[in-house]
Amino acid sequence: MSTDPSQPPSEPANTDPERADREANSYRFGNPRDDASGRFQRRQTLMRDYSRYATVGLQFGLYLTFCILGGYWLDRKVGTSPVLLIAGVLVGFGSGLYSLMRKFPVSTRRKASSHSNPDDPPPAP
């Protein structure tokens, strides 16, 4: 080991034989994270799906909340007790449902429910 301050300190030799074997095998057989069918890829896909569903749920809740609060505020301003609040509930629910349908179109949901035999014709609508 050199004592020259301009040189970076050298790392000590690896004394753990199991770690050395793991590192050698990861280079020899490939890292599981690099494998497209590995756990890392599946976890990444699951997280992407979870975040997509969470986003849609959050959007739905925010649309509903803001429309309800807007209807309540307008009811207090105008003096029409539950009318605009109910309208806010309906508008919020409708806009949340519209957002949900835009995010998950019908065509992708039909593709996901494929037939057991691909040679069979699709069912009549």
Image (cartoon, grey):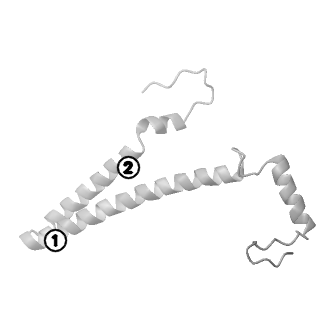
Q: Viewed as shown, does residue 89 lie left or right of 4?
A: left
Q: Position of residue 96 (x, y in %)?
A: 32, 54
Q: Position of residue 69 (x, y in %)?
A: 23, 69
1 or 2: tag closer to the N-terminus: 1
Q: Position of residue 71 (x, y in %)?
A: 18, 65
- In the current view of this chain or complex, which residue is farthest to the left? 78
Q: Can you say which quadrant of the picture contains the N terminus?
A: bottom right
The label shown at residue 107 is none
Badge 1 density bin: few <14, some 14–19, many ≥20, Cα 10 Å: some
Tag 1 secondary structure: helix
**Amino acid under label 1?**
Trp
The label shown at residue 100 is 2
Figure check: 71 above or below 4: above
Q: Viewed as shown, does residue 44 lie left or right of 104?
A: right
Which residue does the image show at 42% across and 44% down from the upper left? 104
**Amino acid under label 2?**
Leu
Q: Can you say which quadrant of the picture contains the C terminus?
A: top left
Please name the residue that numbered disc 1 is placed on: 73
Figure check: 79 above or below 99: below
Q: Do tag 1 and tag 2 residues touch (Cβ < 8 Å)?
A: no
In depth, the one of 84 and 11 nearer the eye is 11
Which residue does the image show at 48% across and 35% down from the upper left? 110
Q: Viewed as shown, does residue 102 lie left or right of 40?
A: left
| Residue 105 visible here | yes
| Residue 79 visible here | no
